[in-house]
Image (cartoon, rainbow, N blue to C red):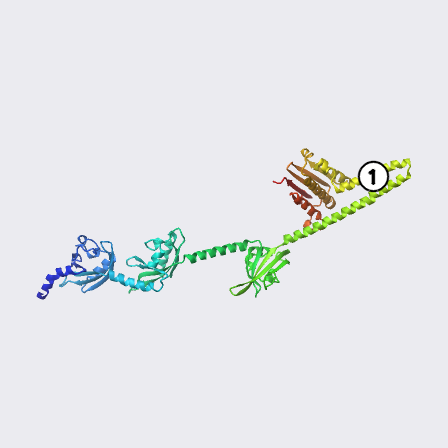
Amino acid sequence: MPALEPWIQAAPAIAAALPDLCFLIGPDLRFAACNRPAHADLHAPWATLQGRPLHSVGPPELARRAVAACGNGPQRLEYALRTSSGRLARFEASIVPLPGDGNGWLYIARDVSSQVALDAEQARYARAMQGVADGLWEWDIAIDSEYFSPRARALLDAPGRLAEQLQADDQGLWRAALQSHLQHGAPLDIDLRLAGPAPRWLRCRGWTERDAQGQPARVLATLSDVTTSKLTEQALSDSQAKFRALFHTVPVGIAVIDIASETVIEANDELGRLLGWPTPSVTGQTVAALGLAPLPGTAGRTEVDHRELRPASGARLHAKLAAEPVELAGRSLLLCVVVDISVQVAAEAALSALAEQLMDQERRTTQRLAQALHDQLGQTLTALRLTLDLGAAAARDQARSLTDQALREVRQVLVDLRPPLLEDEGLAAALDNELAQRRALYPGVRLKLDVEAELLAQRWPGHVEYALFMIAREGLENALRHANPTEVRLSLYGFADEVELGVADDGSGLADGFERCPGHFGLIGMRERARVIGATLTLGPRAGGGTQLTLRWHTPQ
């Protein structure tokens, strides 16, 4: 004991000279003394620590470990603790029992923050050297501190934690990815949007370093600016979406065909509609099953102006085909376009029929005029000349009669060529006169004209009146010749700037597909006359039986 006396006397001076914090812990585990009561690294002012139980100072887990270290032998602790100055410091502590039995413990705490930071910086530097193009982010879990390499800081807009730099929606995604990585070992690989007006993206790829006990100590991640690739991906996605929308809405059928197997690998909605197949069912079918065989050609661009297809519905489809071979991912494909030209073919057939009808009408009109001039007017004039040659007084009366007959025959020819009364008295009078002449030819049919009194003197443009009259005459002729009616009624309604013409009969009605039947070319002519004056013409069944033809015209706006 005498040998220790000098050391016991010198203990206060030694403790004061030590750079480390030294505490005396009494047998009751309370703080009894401190060598540096004014030190900034104390957890709290010494006046508030002195006399406090050891288990009440610092985080609960640290206090529990400190109390557990106050045993019979020397113990060492490593921990992080926030000081009274607000700094988060790392300490290495040695706890040894004081000499004697039950005299307490000496607690020496050394600040090793500088050494830890130096070691961590060296490790970061080594890791950063592996990929200087990316930034490095590190999260020290124990002290809840984040580190950014200079490159990583340059990628961000402002100082602060990584989550604070993200858009609000992505902050939750980042925290969830971290939690899943730490708790379940899920890969930490996520693309995040940075906050700010301009779109910017970061790709975070991370891993976890664990301590000696296997617990997560820190999370590290490389940060890459992937804004350009993201914008490119978005532009490509938008372009693909626009192409797909165009592909499925364009009004022509499109098929992508594998040349080797002659199988459709892609088709749009219009092709399915044209062929009478559900669009999803077209893919995987052979061109033969779809009725597209043979292929237009596989050596360069090929066009087939007209091919008649047989869709699943059984109807005939007139189509134009165009095909061009393409190479995609080493696969030989054929891009085939199917254009429905059925309307065009029908229109061409109708025009051809109309031209044939017009020529036929011209021929028949010429023949009728020639026959009228030869058989009627010619014979009448011959008889007149012979009568005059007789020179008898009685012959003059016969010559007068023949002259009157010749005039009637000329007028009848003119009636056939030009509607009487139309130019002088108007449409209503001309229609009434037409019915009067037809009554003599069809005595068993009631022919009537419904017209308002205000329209008897109404005039419309000359070409309009002529078209209306000719359509009414054609409709009347069709009803009398083909429908076997008991009544045909013409109607005329309207005003100065619009007019509606109707031809209704109570006959046998219209047969299915009547427009395509021989003998109905007159309908084509009526439609063409209506089109020329900008009118609309409809033809259909009449309520109660028969047929109703209606033409509507109004002054162009």
Left or right: where 144 falls relative to 95? right
Q: Vertically, is 408 above or below 33?
A: above
> Residue 425, percent across and down?
72, 35
**Which part of the image, by quadrant, shows the N terminus?**
bottom left
Q: Residue at x 53, y 65 (%)?
A: 331
Residue 208 or residue 456, whichever sits in front: 456
Residue 455 or residue 158, whichever sits in front: 158
**Which part of the image, by quadrant, shows the C terminus?**
top right
Q: Quadrant of residue 248?
A: bottom right
> Residue 132, percent across and down?
35, 62
Q: Quadrant of residue 338?
A: bottom right
> Residue 111, percent across and down?
22, 60
Left or right: where 363 falls relative to 401? left
Q: Is residue 543 visible?
A: no
**Residue bearing the label numbered 1:** 405
Which three-letter amino acid code belongs to the residue tagged 1? Gln
Left or right: where 400 falls relative to 516? right
> Residue 280, percent across and down?
54, 58
Instruction: Classify mark 1: helix, strand or loop.
Output: helix
